[in-house]
Amino acid sequence: MTTTPQMGNQTSKLYQLISICYTSIISEKRNTMEQEKEYFDNETTPAPAEQDSPQCSCRKKERSDKEYKNLQNRLSRIEGQVRGVKKMLENDAYCPDILIQVSAINAALNSFNRLLLANHIRTCVADDIRDGKPDTIDEFVTMLQKLMR
């Protein structure tokens, strides 16, 4: 993958934004400079499994019933849309009609991703930062870079 100066600038701005969020959350938890210094002096490295695979299947997220049902419903609708496009193809539908439906599927997937990402930031990322996990921001930035490909 080649990078452009614009992508580098976006990544730099993203790091700055995440750094600001990180600083804000840490400031809430750590009231004095001495506590912050102690916090950073006592950093530990994560276990090898956490370093090698941020998407490790051993990591899980407990979701509320409402969140789970919302995500499941969205995926079910997307699945139905994909089956519809398959049926259109089998019935020799006109290309632009299929392309419009595929575009709708892409929009639905993007909407699903935005919802999941927002929930991830509000819960997993914020909790990890509050708990003082030092690799959270790097893991988050790496994930965003993969999403932006």
Image: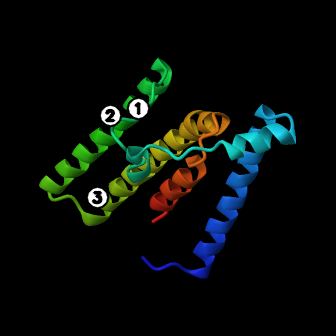
Which residue is pictured at 42% across the width and 24% down the height? Answer: 69
Mark 2 and mark 3 lie on one chain; the one further toward the N terminus is 2
When the figure is inspected, residue 6 is found, relative to residue 144, above or below; the finding is below
Foreground: 131 or 82?
Answer: 131
Q: How is the image coloured?
A: rainbow
Q: Nearer the viewer, residue 5 or 96?
A: 5
Q: Please state which of residues 90 and 74 is positioned toward the viewer in this rendering.
A: 74
User: Residue 56 placed where, x, y %?
Assistant: 36, 43
The kind of residue tagged 2 is Ser
Q: Residue furthest top?
A: 65
Give the farthest residue toward the right.
32
Between residues 77 and 36, which one lies in front from this camera angle?
36
Judge left or right: residue 29 versus residue 77.
Answer: right
Q: Earlier in the sequence, mark 1 or mark 2?
A: 1
Examine the image and state in which quarter residue 120 appears: top right
**Residue 70, picture quadrant:** top left
* Residue 15 seen in this snapshot: yes
Q: CA distance from mark 1 to mark 3?
A: 36 Å
Separation of residues labelled 2 and 3 (CA atoms) = 19 Å
Q: Amino acid at mark 3?
A: Ile
Q: Residue at x 30, y 44 (%)?
A: 81
The residue wearing badge 3 is 98
Quarter of the rendering containing residue 100 = bottom left
- Residue pointed to by mark 1: 60
What residue would you read off at disc 2?
76
Image x and y of residue 127, in percent: 61, 33
**Quarter of the figure that contains the N terminus:** bottom left
Instruction: Report helix, strand or loop for mark 2.
Output: helix
Q: Is residue 6 left or right of residue 99?
A: right
Lower sequence index among marks 1 and 3: 1
Q: Nearer the viewer, mark 1 or mark 2?
A: 1
Q: Residues within 10 Å of mark 1 (few under 14, many from 20)?
A: few
